[in-house]
Amino acid sequence: MKKNVARVLSDGAIGGFIAYALISAYFAAFNVLTGHSAWRTLQTLSDAVFASPGPPQMIAFNGVHMAAFLVLGVIAAFMIQELEVRPAFWYVAFFVSTIGFMLGYVLLSLATSAMANLSPTTVLLGNLIAAVGMGAFLVYRQRHLAM
């Protein structure tokens, strides 16, 4: 049992970090390609969340962002681990993932479009890249489930 918990936590943390890194790189590249600083989205969002803007607030917002992805990674790793024990659990995993992604997309689109002037399409693409990256890693770690 402890081995399963350790694996879920480690796979979830790595998957979450991969998703965090991908979405961070995506927005940095998006900002540079649109003629802005690579840190524009991070700065704008941290300025909107914290009362006093500045580099410490950017670091704090970045930490919260990474923590959120780590939690999502652990949840995803847990769902995949449950698929190994209960193959019929894929129905639950599919619907929880789909509804969670859609709800997250709507909330993030509303928040970021108001705070950072990002289009919902930009937010959707970033989240899809992060989700695919995390999912690819977790499927790689549980290759026997794909067969």
Image (cartoon, rainbow, N blue to C red):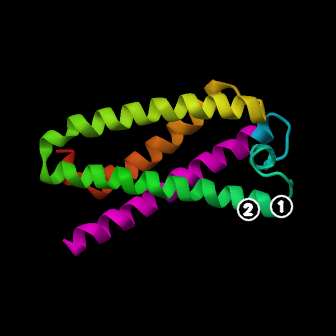
Q: Which type of secondary structure does the marked residue at label 2 adopt?
A: helix
Camera-side residue of 9 and 115: 115
Residue 134 percent coordinates (x, y):
44, 49
The answer to which image quadrant residue 2 occupies is: bottom left
Query: Looking at the figure, which quarter contains the C terminus?
Result: top left
Residue 41, compared with residue 143, is above or below; it is: above
Residue 76 percent coordinates (x, y):
36, 50
User: Which residue, as the protein is rendered here, is positioned at the far bottom?
Assistant: 2
Camera-side residue of 70 and 14: 70
Label 1 neighbour load within 10 Å: few <14, some 14-19, many 20+: few
The residues bearing labels 2 and 1 have C-alpha atoms spaced at a distance of: 6 Å
Left or right position of 24 against 101: right
For the point 55% across and 28% down, the residue is 106
For the point 60% across and 35% down, the residue is 108
Q: Which residue is mark 2?
A: 59
Main SS class of the magenta portion in the image: helix
| Residues under numbered marks 2 and 1 in contact, where contact means CB atoms less than 8 Å apart | yes
Q: Which residue is mark 1?
A: 55
Residues drawn in magenta: 1-30
